[in-house]
Amino acid sequence: MPGLLWDMVGSEVLNEQIPPPFTLADNKIVVTGDVLRLAKLNDDLDNWSPTGKYYQSSAIFPLIKSESLTEVFGFWADYDEEEFEENDGSVGFRISSDNGVTWYGWNGSAWVIGGSFVSREVADANISSLPIDAAREFRVDVRITPSSGGTYTPSVLRVCIFVEMEFDFTEDLERSLAKFCRDKIRVRLRWQESLVGASSATIPDGATIHEPVKVYNLTNDVGRFTNLFSSLVGRVVNFTGPQTGIVLIEYAGQIPVHIETDEDYQIADRMAVIVRTPTVVEATVMRDDGPLIEKMLGGRNLGWGDHTFARVRPQRTWFDCSVVLSCFSTKPKGGKRDSAVMADAIIKALERHRDKWKDRFLSRATGDAFQVLDKTPVTIGDIVGEKVFIRDVTLDVGGYNWLGEAEIKQLVETVVTTVETYDGDK
């Protein structure tokens, strides 16, 4: 199916509510609204000045990762064309597919590491031969050069990389949410046991243990003033010395997350989060718009000679989804608390995703940001006799899906000539 990486400086594909983290080389370049341009600086290059000049600089676009990407075949950037043609400034590009570790430029015949910045036309014509790293983590380095004398700056309005992707929307939603939970959620968990002369303890719970870890001997230190933690090796917590009495260990736990449709999700974890999607409904009212026409895709060799091409694709369609995260624990002690704190940690993480760029809930397939519209924790299914405690978190999630196949077409320009007649008698 068709796809698009980035779509504006502010980005349509990315979450528009959160400013994207552009990497600006210095104070000579700025992002204002939806425009990337140079800043007019004084002679000391330390402040803006209305009588100053523009100086060459560059900026790196935010990361876009698309695991479902199968092909890259087009590149384009929009400027103020009339103003651009009247001045001698320029804009060049380099591209990375491994999150900026390796930058490819063009040497006149091939993409090479550390090569020169290229024009949008050269990038578009040769994008299909760009080496693609297995990570599929794309960034674009944009260099803006002012006109002679520094009196004019080109303005970059839009940057696009056109790609093909293959993925299932529902599966992507579930696996993206599972990854989000694994990466972003750490739950404050407890383990308590009566020990005799023990210098360490092994925590059997299914959660991966992370520091900080705190150890208290509740028999000798009821107020929990002295932390007896020494070191952590896997699931073994070492104490500062032998302990006799009731020992409490508090730690940050990374909870196993499984998807209901996976065959192995019923493994014997003592606590886990299960992801399931009861409903996925297309908001058909969003499909009233006509197809999108994207011009100038010369990267795909169609054998049509020197013509202008366009890719015609359906509009992206919005889907409303209901997702349930079941947080369960079978710990004989503290299981009910664990299920509650897991649900609470999920809600807090999803609150952060709306406010912080680094905490976004992203699609693994496309790099788009899913929108969590509502979230509700519900206690459901506690089986006290069997010590099974379950807390569900129900989410209303929205996201865009690419539907239908794109078509590459040649654009034909029609010139209409108007013939006027003259009646000599009038």
Image (tube, helix red, strand yellow):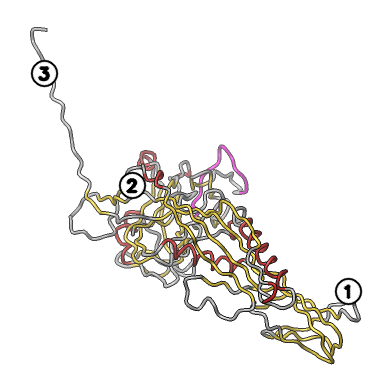
Position of 241 compared to 180: left or right? right
Residue ID at (52%, 76%): 265
Q: Which residues are magenta?
A: 46-58
Type of amino acid under label 1: Phe
Query: Which residue does the numbered mark 1 point to in the structure image?
Result: 225
Q: Can you tell which mark lies on residue 292?
A: 2
Residue ID at (50%, 55%): 59
Q: Nearer the viewer, residue 106 or 277?
A: 277
Image quarter where the N terminus lies is: bottom left
Query: Which residue does the numbered mark 3 point to in the structure image?
Result: 421
Q: Residues within 10 Å of mark 2 (few under 14, many from 20)?
A: some
Q: Secondary structure at mark 1?
A: loop
Dot 3 and dot 1 residues touching (CB under 8 Å): no
Q: Can you tell which mark lies on residue 417?
A: none
Type of amino acid under label 2: Leu
Is the magenta region chiefly helix, strand or loop? loop
